[in-house]
Amino acid sequence: MEIPKFLIERYQFWKKNTFEDYKNIYDQAYKTTQKPIAMIITCCDSRILENSIFGGNVGDYFIHRNIANIVPSINDKENNIPTLSAIEYALKVLKIPNLIILGHSNCGGVEYSYKTFKDKKNLNNFEYISKWVSCLDIPFNKIPKDITENEKITFLEQENIKQSIENLYEYDFINKLIIEKKLNVIGLWYQINSGLIKFLDKQNSFIDLD
Ligand SMILES: [Zn+2]
């Protein structure tokens, strides 16, 4: 195994510069337990820089990433363990008061799910991804027929966020915290090229954040 040059160079730069600048914050973080202000569930996509977008510092955000930022249903026993483990720790141990589902434009996972459902076959023979994105069956069935292909995929990206939030309510420990107003659930959709973020309002519609 070889450590790539880019990794060494970038690490050394970070250690000499960023780490030095924030040394006290890192030291403080080491001495105290973490107390994040929000949990963010987002996609594995490398273009989502949630700490940059929301000005995250050490200890601010508890992050869980999976393909297409999905919270599987309680009935989906084969898929829900990794995401629910992260949520369970965030809510029961860290008692994080905000849970953000951050979806995004140009999501390869959502697009793959869309095409798989549409053509009714596993296009690339992805052994694991096709099983994972099959979680999106309910949102897929809500796609309007009279819109363009791109609009359908965007619709599915946003409907997936709504469905993931709905799925959260199925878990008693999460539902209880929401009812008791100890947990605020936030749905966001981020457009990569424009930087626009839309949030899910009380009417369950996506509205521009700025
Ligand atoms: Zn994605």
Image (tube, helix red, strand yellow):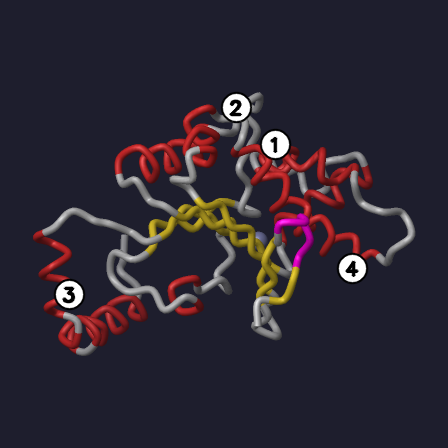
Q: Amino acid at mark 3?
A: Ile
Q: Which residues are magenta?
A: 202-206
The answer to whether residue 205 is above or below residue 198 is above
Marks 1 and 3, how far apart at CA: 41 Å
Badge 1 or badge 3: first in the primary sequence: 3
The answer to whether residue 96 is above or below residue 14 is above
Q: Amino acid at mark 1?
A: Lys
- Mark 4: few/some/many CA within 10 Å (<14, 14-19, 20+): few
- Membership of 204 in magenta stretch: yes
Q: Quarter of the image for the C terminus: give it.
A: bottom right
Q: Which residue is mark 2?
A: 78
Image spot of residue 57 (x, y percent): 28, 65
Q: Is residue 74 left or right of residue 116?
A: left
Toward the front, the furthest residue is 180
Q: Which residue is mark 1?
A: 131
Q: Which residue is mark 4?
A: 150
Tell me if label 4 and label 1 are in contact, CB under 8 Å: no
Q: Nearer the viewer, mark 4 or mark 1?
A: 4
Marks 2 and 4, how far apart at CA: 30 Å
- Mark 2: few/some/many CA within 10 Å (<14, 14-19, 20+): few
Q: Is residue 52 left or right of residue 111?
A: left
Marks 2 and 1, how far apart at CA: 9 Å
- Membership of 96 in magenta stretch: no
Q: Secondary structure at mark 4?
A: helix
For the point 21% across and 49% down, the residue is 34
Which corner quadrant of the image does residue 180 belong to? top left
